[in-house]
Amino acid sequence: MRKQQTGFTLLEVMLVLALMGLIISAVTYTALATNNYDQVNNQAKRFQVVFDMASDFAILNQVQLGIRIDEEENTYTYVALDEEDKWIELPDQKLFASYQMPEYMTLELNLEDLPWEQEDQLFDRGVFDESLSVSEEDVEIGNEEDIPPPPPQIFLLSSGDITPFELSMTYEDDFSVEDPITFILRAKETTPIDRIAPKDFE
């Protein structure tokens, strides 16, 4: 009788390759998941650093800056107040260009009920009303294309004053079983602003 040949059948090879693919996918997913915390932390650091630089820019150049937070689009944009009291994006300033948050990261801005908030400190120029927006005087209603973008919610003034706020950056995907990861950026009346990790929440 012939000796039975030993080796792997095509089905066995395909099964091994499939198992290896599953293992690699699991390892890759685990590696990405463990980095989610660092990703949110890095985004919070970026906002913190650029914000402080923008405040210095406002003081050194004696301009009034603002940040427009779009929670629906998960973007934030730095704008400047021009001589006609209109908010415009800063030309030739890539660092302050509109920034899109990465996938699965969201922004949530809080301007109310802050214990250190000081009333009326940002309204001495007559440009801002009590709801932290541009005054509605001389605003004409026209086509949607002619409607300017909404005003910024956060102000960085040439005096060094800033709007007190709390900005939450949260990572939450559709497939993870882990709890959302949230960092909070907390600003009082002047820079620097604080970056608060989840473990430091009160």
Image: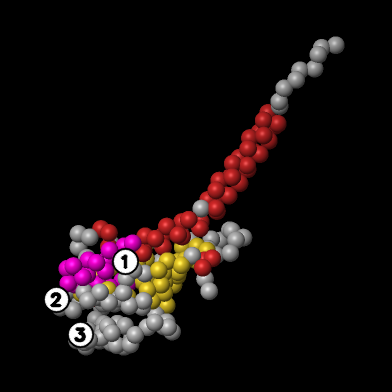
Image position, residue 84 (x, y; %): 15, 78
CA distance for labels 3 and 2: 13 Å
Q: Residues within 10 Å of mark 2 (few under 14, many from 20)?
A: few
Left or right, 105 with reference to 62: right
Q: Is residue 152 visible?
A: no
Residue indicated by mark 2: 83
Q: Earlier in the sequence, mark 3 or mark 2?
A: 2
Magenta part of the chain: 49-68
Classify mark 1: helix, strand or loop. Answer: helix
Dots 3 and 2: beta carbons under 8 Å? no
Classify mark 3: helix, strand or loop. Answer: loop
Image position, residue 169 (x, y; %): 45, 66
Which numbered disc covers residue 125? 3
Left or right, 88 with reference to 187: left
Which numbered disc covers residue 51? 1
Is residue 102 depicted above or below 135 in this figure? above
Question: Residue 13 or 202: which is nearer the viewer?
Answer: 202
CA distance for labels 1 and 2: 23 Å
Dots 1 and 2: beta carbons under 8 Å? no
Q: Amino acid at mark 3?
A: Arg
Residue drawn 21% across and 74% down?
158
Residue drawn 42% across and 77% down?
110
Q: Amino acid at mark 1?
A: Phe
Question: Residue 62 or 67: which is nearer the viewer?
Answer: 62
Residue drawn 41% across and 72% down?
186
Image position, residue 35 (x, y; %): 51, 53
Question: Residue 101 or 167: which is nearer the viewer?
Answer: 167
Q: State which quadrant residue 125 falls in.
A: bottom left
Q: Main secondary structure of the magenta part?
A: helix
Q: Of all residues shown, which one is farthest toward the right?
A: 1
Q: Is residue 129 visible?
A: yes
Q: Amino acid at mark 2?
A: Glu
